[in-house]
Amino acid sequence: MAPAQRCTLCRQTFFCGRGHVYSRKHQRQLKAALDRLLPQVEAARRAIRTAHVERYVPEHDRCCWCLCCSCEVRKHLSHGNLTVLHGGLLEHLASPEHKKATNRFWWENKAEVHMKEKFLISPQDYAQFKKSMVKGLDSYEEKEDEVIKEMAAQIREVEHRQQEVVRSVLEPQAVPDPEEGSSAPGSWKGTNSQVAPTSQRPSYLDLPPAQELDWMDTGQPLTFIGHQV
């Protein structure tokens, strides 16, 4: 009997030796596993000519499972507050370690030979990606400079408006001259409205005129201290 062997793809132990990798079940599991990895590799390959740079967010720390190397690989390449999308996976696929592990995986699992190149990145392609990455970083910095300028202009506009409001509050208000105000038409109206009508005037204003003194009719001359001459 052949020694027991553990198949990581089928997650089972077999005693049929190398014959298991030719079985229909194993080949079906192998194709499904490669189909899960292939879309991520193709997305990374599209970034070779046009590298895309973004501001770092925690989601950029996500990893993907490399079937050939049996390890997790960071999908993106982050440095500081910037991230080059798919940079981490491209770096891994172009490494000599990944190429060596891919050759061993293909031989051990009897995968289709024409599929192997789809999971490898040549040194020439990776060199082109590095040039594209430099251009992407320069383009990102230019966009950031434009955004900073726009934000600075908005801040200056807000500060200018605030200064206008403060200046209008602190400026002294014009106080009208009392003399000028009294000659205004509105002041006449107010003055006339304060004059009480005849029916409301005090009673002493309606008293009859005082009677003339008697000495005015007697015709007698007066002397000092009221003595007659």
Image (cartoon, rainbow, N blue to C red):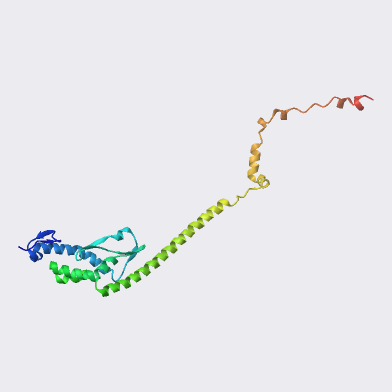
Query: Which of 167 and 76 lies nearest the eye of the viewer?
Result: 76
**Up/down of 159 relative to 196, above or below:** below
Is 170 on the left or on the right of 195, as rendered?
A: left
- Where residue 136 appears, as percent x and y from the top left, is 34, 69
Which quarter shows the C terminus?
top right
Q: Name the residue: 69% across, 29% down.
A: 202
> Which of the 4 image quadrants contains residue 182?
top right
Is 43 on the left or on the right of 26, as rendered?
A: right
Query: Which of 3 and 127 lies nearest the eye of the viewer?
Result: 3
**Count of all numbered marks drawn on residues in the image:** 0
Q: Outermost residue toward the right? A: 229
Q: Outermost residue toward the left? A: 1
Which quarter shows the N terminus?
bottom left
- Where residue 189 appears, as percent x and y from the top left, is 64, 41
> Which of the 4 image quadrants contains residue 96?
bottom left
Q: Name the residue: 26% across, 61% down.
A: 63
Determine if residue 220 is in view.
Answer: no
- Where residue 165 appears, as percent x and y from the top left, is 53, 53
Is 164 on the left or on the right of 16, as rendered?
A: right
**Up/down of 106 relative to 214, above or below:** below
> Which of the 4 image quadrants contains residue 143?
bottom left
Q: Name the residue: 10% across, 59% down.
A: 13
Query: Which of 82 and 197 lies nearest the eye of the viewer?
Result: 82
- Where residue 190 appears, as percent x and y from the top left, is 63, 40
Determine if residue 202 is in view.
Answer: yes
